[in-house]
Amino acid sequence: MNSLTVFVRNSSGSPATGAKVNYEVGGGISCVGGGSPVYTDNSGRAVITWSSGCKCTYIYINGKAHKGNYQNGGTYNFSK
């Protein structure tokens, strides 16, 4: 399994507790779609996991898409 860590902050800079984080994968015929959403904890942190051999191409924060080439083991910061 692959995984990455997401940190979400409010516009004020404080951690966004309970933000909905989802993702989309690509990279092969068995790598289509996304998984179940996860929610940020009190520090604004969430960990998403996806199948090995796939690439994470989108991260969604409360439904807003962020396209990128997200790497296994990476840490990414977002504002909501």
Image: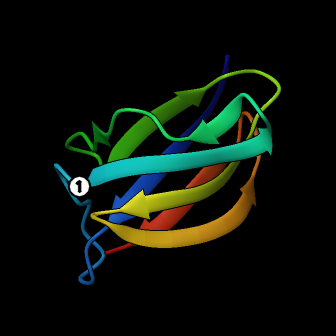
Q: How many marks?
A: 1
From the image, tell me which residue sits under label 1: 19
Relative placement, left or right, of 66 versus 62 is right
> Which is nearer the eye, 23 or 27?
27
Residue plotted at (24% across, 68% down):
14
| Residue 24 to residue 77: above or below | above
Q: Position of residue 30 (x, y in %)?
A: 72, 28
> Which is nearer the eye, 34 or 8?
34
Residue farthest toward the top in the current orientation of the protein:
1
Q: Amino acid at mark 1?
A: Ala
Can you tell which quarter of the image residue 36 is in? top left
Q: Residues within 10 Å of mark 1 (few under 14, many from 20)?
A: many
> Which is nearer the eye, 62 or 18?
62
Relative placement, left or right, of 49 versus 28 is left
Can you tell which quarter of the image residue 54 is in? top right
| Protein image colouring | rainbow
Residue plotted at (43% across, 54% down):
7
Relative placement, left or right, of 31 versus 23 is right
Q: Position of residue 23 (x, y in %)?
A: 50, 48
Q: Position of residue 66 (x, y in %)?
A: 54, 71
Q: Position of residue 32 (x, y in %)?
A: 63, 40
Secondary structure of the residue carrying tag 1 is loop
Residue plotted at (70% across, 34% down):
31
